[in-house]
């Protein structure tokens, strides 16, 4: 399968993923020390929700369009910041744009120059790299035509000694991809055990996800936190039942912030015609491996 994110830009998984990224960046920035952030799978950087691909699926209606219409006055801070970020991106570019992860990293760097954050993004696919470089070249983020599996090992540990490696792979073959990504995480963790690693993953083949969890538990990586939000039960065959994020070495109390975020988002992002989910199956933040 040749994955193309333009079909899925701004969907519910993007909303959850980017709000959790905002939360991670904000918490890492609470210490008055520089830190490094790498988006290992940068993609295009900016996506048009008026494109043929986005209009064909209409997935943004249940994602960014839903959150922008919602009452977020009492939302957690990261959700409010996400909404303001979308508004800024639309003011800067156009009202149909959806910013990808590299933009959110660059946006954080721009907002907090005093903390000395250094951001970079890799993209291995030539056409996507060209788009990423063209669209974000004026923003404070380094853009590199580079493969995550080679590139991460080359840049860690960073000179700042603190930071986040953010991974949002395409998952063209889940069983194989999960295994390869665990190997990548283990290799990276062994080289830089103090780093924070955040890996987005789809929840659609529950057997593959459960096997993924079992394999992670067998590694020697500590402090593995899993955040899940589901919009369909696992026994219903749809394109994407839910969205997950694995965070290794999350900042202190990130788990509590993630619970608040997911609990607030779930009723906004739920699908009207989907069966009701129990609170535990709709959102779940738990430690896969503790200290």
Image: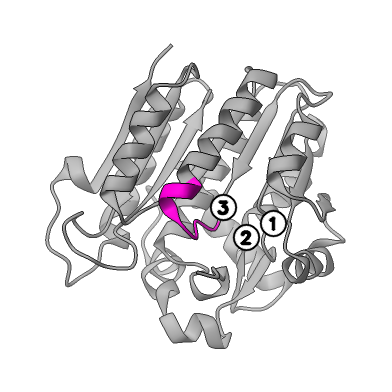
Give the structural element (helix, strand or loop) at label 1: helix
Give the spatial CA distance, label 2 vs label 3: 13 Å
Determine whether label 2 and label 1 are within 8 Å by CB: yes
Residue 208 location in percent, x, y? 33, 46
Residue at the image point whose x is 83% and y is 50% from the top: 140
* Image-quadrant location for residue 167: top right
Question: For residue 170, which quarter of the picture?
Answer: bottom right
> Which is more toward the observer, 122 or 210?
210
> How packed is label 3: few (under 14 Cα within 10 Å), some, or many (20 or more)?
some
Residue 38 in the image: above or below residue 230: above
Q: Does the magenta stretch include residue 55?
A: no
Which range of residues does the magenta coloring cover? 170-177
In the image, what residue occupies the spot 20% across and 54% down?
A: 234
Q: Distance between the residues labelled 2 and 1?
A: 6 Å
* Pair 3/1: label in front: 3
Instruction: Name the residue tied to disc 2.
Output: 100
Q: Residue 103 carries which label?
A: 1
For discs 2 and 3, the disc positioned in front in the rendered view: 3
Mark 3 or mark 1, earlier in chain = 1
The residue tagged 3 is: 169
Q: Does dot 2 land on a helix, a strand or a loop?
A: loop
Picture residue at 50% right of the left edge, 60% below the top: 172
């Amino acid at each position: 399968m040749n994955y193309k994110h333009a079909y899925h830009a701004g969907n519910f998984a993007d909303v959850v993923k980017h709000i959790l990224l905002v939360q991670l960046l904000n918490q890492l920035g609470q210490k008055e020390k520089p830190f490094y952030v790498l988006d290992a799978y940068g993609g295009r950087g900016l996506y048009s929700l008026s494109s043929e691909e986005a209009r064909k699926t209409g997935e943004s209606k249940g994602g960014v369009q839903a959150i922008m219409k919602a009452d977020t006055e009492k939302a957690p801070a990261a959700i409010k910041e996400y909404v303001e970020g979308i508004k800024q991106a639309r003011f800067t570019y156009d009202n149909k744009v959806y910013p990808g992860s590299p933009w959110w990293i660059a946006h954080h760097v721009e907002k907090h120059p005093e903390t000395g954050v250094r951001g970079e993004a890799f993209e291995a696919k030539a056409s996507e790299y060209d788009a990423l470089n063209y669209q974000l070249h004026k923003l404070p983020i380094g853009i590199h035509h580079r493969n995550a599996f080679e590139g991460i090992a080359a840049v860690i540990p960073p000179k700042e000694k603190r930071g986040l490696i953010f991974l949002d792979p395409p998952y063209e073959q889940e069983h194989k991809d999960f295994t390869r990504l665990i190997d990548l995480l283990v290799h990276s963790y062994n080289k830089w055990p103090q780093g924070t690693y955040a890996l987005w993953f789809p929840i659609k083949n529950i057997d593959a996800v459960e096997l993924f969890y079992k394999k992670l538990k067998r590694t020697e990586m500590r402090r593995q936190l899993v955040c899940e939000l589901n919009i369909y039960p696992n026994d219903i065959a749809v394109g994407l039942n839910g969205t997950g994020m694995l965070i290794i070495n999350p900042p202190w109390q990130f788990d509590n912030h993630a619970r608040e975020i997911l609990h607030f988002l779930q009723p906004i992002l739920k699908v009207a015609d989907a069966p009701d989910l129990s609170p535990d199956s709709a959102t779940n933040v738990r430690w896969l491996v503790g200290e």
